Amino acid sequence: MSIIYDKKQRTITLHTDHTTYQMQIDRYGFLLHLYYGGKADGCMDYLLTYYDRGFSGNPYEAGTDKTYSMDSLPQEFPSLGTGDYRTPACIIKNTDRTYCSDFRYVSHEIRDGKYALPGLPAVYADTAEAQTLEVVLEDPVTGVRAVLLYGVLPRYDIITRSVKIVNASQGYVSVKKLAPACLDLLGGEYDFITFYGRHAMERNCQRMPVGHGVHKIGSLRGTSSHQYNPAVILAARDATEDAGSCYGMAFVYSGGFQSEAGMDQYYQTRVLMGFSEEQFAYPLNPGEELQSPEVILTYSGAGLGQLSRNFHRCIRTHLCRGKYKEKVRPILLNSWEASYFDFTGESLLKLARQAADLGIEMFVLDDGWFGNRDSDLRGLGDWYVNEEKLGCTLGELIGKINGMGLKFGIWIEPEMVNEDSDLYRAHPDWAFVIPGRRPNRSRYQLVLDFSRKEVVDYIFDRICAVLDQGNVEYVKWDMNRSLADVYSATADSQGRVLHDYVLGLYDFLERLVERYPDILIEGCSGGGGRFDAGMLYYTPQIWCSDNTDPIDRLEIQYGTSFIYPASCVGAHVSASPNHQTRRVTSMKTRGMVAMAGTFGYELNLNELDSEEKDEIRRQIAEYKKYASLVQTGTYYRLTNPQTDNQGAWEFVSEDQKEALVQVVGIKKHANMTVDYIKVRGLKENTMYRDTQSGRLYNSTALMEAGVPKPVLEGEYQAFQWHFVCEE
């Protein structure tokens, strides 16, 4: 049993293979958090201390006992109004317009299997793989309930958390803040690791000490955003890749979010993850409920590398779904950087012929194929094929491309509309615009109100009419702006619109997945603007960044790897000089960086010389040789490209018999020093052979002393070793 209730101690303990999480129902019915860390048995309530804390108040039931205060005790679900003045996980405005939720324990249930969340993405597992804990808390005055859900996947060292607020009162209430995951840690000093960025430079790793006060990150953009990723790590100050305690939280949600971490007056640390508070005020009439998305939690006592690998295994095998969940993805060519909007059916076929000749497996038609779409000024929302531009029907174009031995994919942006479109002229109220105000534009487009079912249904039908015209095997789902001017004519409260928008998006995606189970969907939002665990439930890969420069990608993919597996990372070889940075790099270097994800190309093949085309053929053959290892192998970060002379990473097979180490030089100086790359994850004191040179290496020496990276001429040189166990 992974979940154990001790009736005498009134503790509920969640065990995974290597971790333990424990809570306790105390004498007043509060649900206290006792412990989260390495696997341990017994009751940990000895960690709680009670003494007079001065201005920290006491529940009325405590009488004259001034040693008991919610302002200092660690809690599972802290709410506003109990005398806890730290940042709460829940704020509810009651029928009488007061802000108070005094949640006390009512009951709990333990059952086999992992809970599901209707209308929301969530980690899944069969009955033998997981258990669920449901804890019911209730405010005895209002009757409002908080139903806490915990999912335990022992083998993966994963615990998930979600909460459902049920309005069992007699009147209207409004949920003003909701964070389904809270960790209260009593001792220790921690760093808060977050992943910040901007368009074309996402998920830069930032590590800051948790000090007094609250450090808050989040997104007000209606999406998870380029600026901050909805995943954070709390790490002991001395935690490294290979040692030390760390806690991870990943929000399975694609809308606005916030995460807060702070040290209180008693040097205790609280970290929260949940909805963004801004523009959030979710109304609940009597009998209605609000189900939160879930947060994936994991703990590692063996450093950040193990924490990441816990996330990777869970996301790859128990969050991603469908035919391509663990299948090697086809090598594709995307037409965008080859031609942008300037193409015809003939130019597309010419590009596709080159792709087929080089061994590429899929051709993807990007933006510009529909409506009056010859620039980003017009056409979004008009999802009918521009047959005049293509010179044929879409079905005929697909047939010709399939005839070359290529699969076919297509780009869509269903959530958006241009003012210069037939759809907007017919239904201007379907776009987010505040009455009486001029809207903010971004990329000359507005956002459709996906909180309205009729809007989602219409766009869904139009997209399906396109996909039904031929053998489409891949869809790139894009979203090229943030949400602003949020107003829905049909909403009973504007404070619910942003969340209902995300629910509408998920409804669309779920129906698309059900109708087209064999289509591979790649998520995208100006690259990595919606790279989150929620989208991965529907789209098992996401375009990592619009920035395809391989040297910038070293940092982007490094930050991404802390939470997300390589199998989810869309990565392509593009032109040199790069279209975003104008940096010049070799085809080999561009290929090696792209091989650390779902491999493909994004450049005009017609402009390449014979030598470059031969290099592409070699890259494709090499990638196919290692693709399964990259897709399902255990991932190790070997260097930090933000500070080191090179970016280096490694994939190790599950049986440890094979390892692929890839290195790209970043800094270059005269009379260059030698860097040693320390390999990880091999069998101890075992001989491994480098398949390129044939040389034998002792694994312990490789891991402890490393292997010298060759000093090569020129900038940004790439190198790799492929080690095979000689056992």
Image (tube, rainbow, N blue to C red):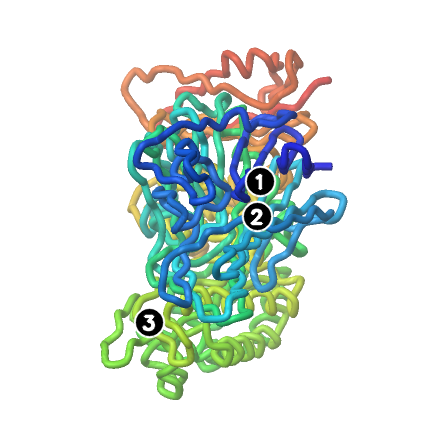
How far is mark 2 from mark 1, CA to CA? 7 Å
Please indicate, yes or no, whether residue 603 appears anywhere in the rendered image. no
Q: Position of residue 580 (x, y in %)?
A: 31, 50
The disc, 2 or 1, on the residue closer to the chain's N-terminal end is 1
Residue neighbourhood size for the residue with mark 1, other residues' Cα within 10 Å, grouped as few (<14), some (14–19), many (≥20)? some
At x 54%, y 24%, the residue is 46
Secondary structure under the numbered disc 1 in the rendered image:
strand
Whether the residues at callouts 2 and 1 have beta carbons within 8 Å, the answer is: yes
- The N terminus is located in which quarter? top right
Label 3, label 1: how many angstroms apart (C-alpha)? 52 Å
Which dot marks residue 25? 1
Q: Split into 4 quadrants, where in the image is the C terminus?
A: top right
Position of residue 29 measured from the top left corner of the image (x, y, whole percent):
55, 44
Q: Which mark is residue 105?
A: 2
Q: Residue at x 65, y 51 (%)?
A: 124
Residue that lies at the very extreme toward the front in this rendered image: 64
Say if mark 2 contacts mark 3, CB within 8 Å.
no
User: Which amino acid, mark 1?
Assistant: Ile
Question: Which corner quadrant of the image does residue 510 belong to?
Answer: bottom right
Q: Which residue is mark 3?
A: 445
The foreground one among 10 and 526 is 10
Disc 3 on helix, strand or loop?
Answer: loop
The amino acid on which the numbered mark 2 sits, given as a three-letter code, is Tyr
Q: CA distance from mark 2 to mark 3?
A: 49 Å
For this view, does 609 lie left or right of residue 362? left
